Amino acid sequence: MISPETPPGAEVICLDATAGPYGRCEGLARGAIYTVARIARGIDGGHVVILAEVSPWRTYAPPWGVVEVGFELRRFRYLDIPDELTRLLRETQFEDV
């Protein structure tokens, strides 16, 4: 899964293009590579990703007004693992559970 701190311009790969709670995921294809336009706050308090290649669906949601509906972060993973994550994995001491 990608992070809410994923920077614009990061390349991600789609892992899940199945229908979600709001219907079909128009424009998504499993295994396709996309570019992150931005990460936004979702109406439910979580985060969603807005992709450069797929125009966001717009809807009216009271009391916010017109909102852009993005895709759940869990649907994507990084195409390349960022150096920061690789460094954290090297430096972290794992404990036997």
Image: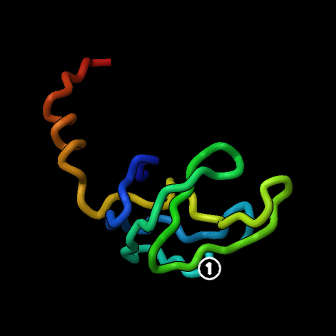
- Image coords of residue 82 (percent x, y): 23, 51
Give the quadrant of residue 15: bottom left
Where in the figure is residue 42, as x and y percent of width and height? 64, 52
**Exactly how many numbered labels are in the figure?**
1
**96 or 52, which is in the foreground?**
52
- At x 44% / y 61%, what residue is drawn? 76
How crowded pointer 1 is (Cα within 10 Å; few <14, some 14-19, many 20+) is rated as few
Position of 42 with respect to 22 (left or right) is: left
Residue at 33% in and 18% down = 97
Tag 1 secondary structure: loop
In terms of depth relative to the viewer, which is nearer, 10 or 20?
A: 10
Q: Is residue 47 above or below residue 16?
A: above
Up the image or down, 76 lies above or below 54; here it is above
Is residue 22 left or right of 83 when viewed as pictured?
Answer: right
Q: Is residue 5 above or below residue 7?
A: above
For mark 1, what is the residue? 26
**Vertical placement of residue 32 versus 49, above or below:** below
Percent position of residue 69, x then y: 65, 65
Residue type of the residue flagged with mark 1? Glu
Residue 7 rendering spot, x and y as whole percentages: 36, 56
